[in-house]
Image (spheres, grey):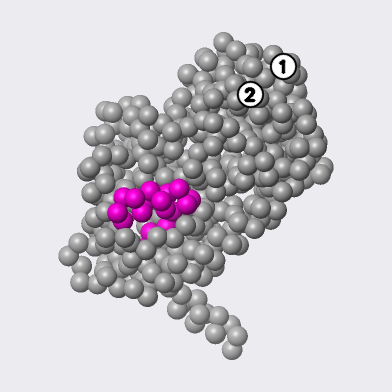
Amino acid sequence: MWALEQRRAFSERKRVLVLTSTFPRWPGDTEPRFVYDLCLKLAESFEMHVVAPHTDGAERVERWNGLHVHRFQYFPEQWQSLAYEGGILTKLRKNPLIAVQVPFFLGSQILLVRRLLERLSFDAVHAHWILPQGLCAVLAQAGRRRKVPILCTSHGGDLFGLRGALFDALRRWVLSRSAAVTVVSHAMAERMRTSGITTPCHVIPMGTDLKTLFTPDPRTPRRTATVLFVGRLVEKKGVRYLIQAFGHVRRRLPEAELWIVGSGPDKAFLKKQAASIAPVHSLEWGERPVPCVDFPVCPGAITFFGSVPHGELPHFYRSATVTVVPSVVAQSGDQEGLGLVLVEAMGCGCPVIASDLPAIRDVIRPGETGLVVPPKESRALAEAIGTALSQPALRQKLSNDARRWALQAFDWTTIEEKYRKTLTEVMQRSR
């Protein structure tokens, strides 16, 4: 009887269609996985289907850890280059010629979403990013008698980085046809308000696993002068200012070293900049299977590790002395939507320093859970790094307070419950 009830409950689960342009392409992929992780958590309550861009080497359709994944091919396979490895907006700015793929990207996504809506009965569509996924979700339902309610989630780039009257009008049009919208920080909610958007808006950050993955490990010795950066090597991450700051730090503390974990279109420029300041090492993660705690200390050096699998990042956070997120507002207006790297570092007990941007204030309580400095101020950043490296008692206090705060606010247990509740409310609305 119990088994029968379980099967009936499973068959009666509500069905959610997720649209995203950022999603792991295969197991062990280094692409950001926050959408994937959220889907995994929600799969405990809903039947989750994911629509994501295809890329060479990825499956077109697959069942992955309980998720139904559908990938749309939008250009000849070997030439698809809009998504992944840096993000769509960054790629378009670096190489405007690939804009020719945009109409095919949108059209292919709309067609696949429409086919899925016709084939299966969905209770909600969850579009990550208002543009383009929210737009595709709306257009895919054009002319349909039964409209599936849409929840849009903005992660920042589609709100801050797409400026101008046309994009403002598109956002308002999409959200006027959506049941609700979520944003990952209060700064984004304020931008929504000042933009005149009246769609119900909820502030729900992305979460991470702070109970089994991003945790302290007393067996891992923490280094005494290692500065860590984790993230994409793109303009808004502000790595150039961190490298400048490190030049000042190493003159005061010659034993200090800088680790840069991540890849992106600015990598070559940043390596050239680093070489003018300090000895540079390149050590791609795949070239060294042992944990980074076994890497030799390189006083005064800057080491580029390239992209690192998500599950290996705790090695770095547990070993580093301090993690720095030197984010800036890019020339396009794009900026951090939240700063999840800060949460991961906090979970591992690593003290954090970050630029004082609006969204960062949702994560860091200055002087309590981390240190903040003005963005683009390399000397102020160097001073904060020097303070953290030279004061073990301060680091310990920041570490303890930050982990308690992160567990309370950003663990997936808390975040999944908020998204489950929001999706359930959306399903009860018909537009």
Can residue 206 be seen in this snapshot? yes
Magenta stretch in the rendered image: 180-197
Residue 252, numbered label: 1
Between the C-alphas of marks 1 and 2, the distance is: 10 Å
**Crowd around label 2: few <14 · some 14–19 · many ≥20 (10 Å):** many
- Residue at the limit of the structure toward the left, as seen here: 143
Q: What element carries label 2?
A: helix
**Can you say which quadrant of the picture contains the C terminus?**
bottom left
Disc 1 and disc 2 in contact, CB within 8 angstroms? yes
Can residue 71 be seen in this snapshot? no
Q: What element carries label 1?
A: helix
Which amino acid, mark 1?
Arg
Residue 83 inside the magenta-drawn segment:
no
Q: Is residue 208 above or below residue 67?
A: above
Which amino acid, mark 2?
Ala
Residue 192 inside the magenta-drawn segment:
yes
Residue 382, numbered label: 2
Give x and y (percent) for residue 17: 38, 62
